[in-house]
Structure formats: C-alpha cells, structure tokens
Image (cartoon, rainbow, N blue to C red):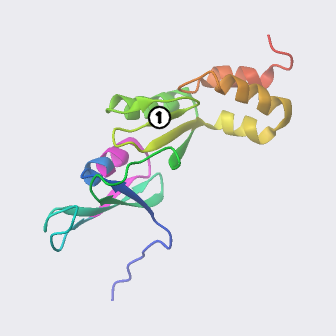
Amino acid sequence: MVQKTIAKNTICLWYDTDAEEAARFYAATFPNSTVGKIHRAPSDNPSTKAGEVLMVDFTVAGIPCIGLNGGPAFKHNEAFSFQIATDDQEETDRYWNAIVGNGGQESECGWCKDKWGVSWQITPRVLIEAMAAGGEEAKRAFDAMMTMHKIDVATIEAARQSSHGH
C-alpha cells in the first residue's frame, strides 16, 4: 500500500481562474518550488465548470500550498505575504525583477505584488539580521529601509556599520 503524505498545514491561496499559471510561475522563479497535482472540478460549481482546474497543489520555497480557482469574490491583500530571505543583491534583484516584471507592481520596504495580487517581501538576510540585533543598529537599518522600494543590500550594510551616520 502506498502511503501519501499530506502536510498537516497547507496555505490555501484563492485565485479567480489562474491558480495553475501562478503555481507554474512560482515554481519557475523560486528554488525548492514545484507544481504538484492538478485537481479538476468533479462537477459544475459557482467558480468552475466540470473538468476545469479547481485546485493546484504546489510548493513555494519548501512551503506547501494549494491554489484554489474560486472566482472573483475575494482578492489578495497585504494582510498575507510570502517573505523570501535573500543572500545578496543579485538574488534580491532576481526575485524582485521576476515578480514585478511579470505584471506585478513595486511597493515599499521590500514589498511587491505579483500579477495575481499576492504580496511578497523580498528581504535580504542582512536586513533580517540587523532587525534581530536590535538597538541602534536595528534603528539605522530600519530608517534606511523606510526610504526604499526594492532593498539595497549595500545601503543596509552601511547603515548597520555606521555608528554616527556619515
């Protein structure tokens, strides 16, 4: 008998009709991301016709998710976001540019939205470390971050180092 492992906790993301397209984009963009089983509607329902894609199993950077094609009733907002920790400017740029360049939009402080309205925080580890350090170092890094859209790693590193500004 084959044992199937189903995660105890799975994030369910509501899409209008594009769950499969979104899942494929995430899998192509982020490491440790895959598209799993595509579930088709067994019968007509308010959001899909029988045989159309109803749910998509996928993984984003190791986190199990389900994309649900639920129709236009609910929209994504910033109350939920994925936070992707990046190692350097090149990785930060790659994810930011992939999301924004694929019909997404820039926001502030390292946040952007993909074309489906899902929010992403593309957050360099240097910023996470500065915030964890607390005190003046965290304040300097936070103040620098507040002026940014995409996070500039060199500016955050400089803010962490400088004890009395420039």
Looking at the picture, tell me which residue is in the foreground, 106 or 154. 106
Looking at the picture, tell me which residue is in the foreground, 18 or 159. 18
Q: Residue furthest top?
A: 166
Q: Position of residue 7 (x, y in %)?
A: 46, 71
Q: Residue furthest bottom?
A: 1
The quarter of the rendered structure image containing the C terminus is: top right
Q: Is residue 29 magenta?
A: yes
Looking at numbered disc 1 in the image, what kind of residue is underneath it? Cys
Name the residue carrying label 1.
Answer: 112
Residue at image location 29% in from the left, 49% down from the top: 24
- Drawn side of residue 50 relative to residue 78, left or right: left
Q: Height in image: 158 above or below 25?
A: above
- Drawn side of residue 10 relative to residue 147, left or right: left
Residue at image location 78% in from the left, 29% down from the top: 139
Crowdedness near tag 1: few (<14), some (14–19) or many (≥20) residues, C-alpha within 10 Å = many
Q: Is residue 30 magenta?
A: yes
Q: Position of residue 117 (x, y in %)?
A: 39, 42
Q: Position of residue 61 (x, y in %)?
A: 47, 51
- Drawn side of residue 135 relative to residue 38, left or right: right
Looking at the picture, tell me which residue is in the foreground, 54 or 95. 54
The quarter of the rendered structure image containing the N terminus is: bottom left
Q: Position of residue 120 (x, y in %)?
A: 49, 41
Q: Which residue range is magenta in the image?
A: 23-37
Residue at image location 35% in from the left, 28% down from the top: 101
Q: Height in image: 24 above or below 45?
A: above
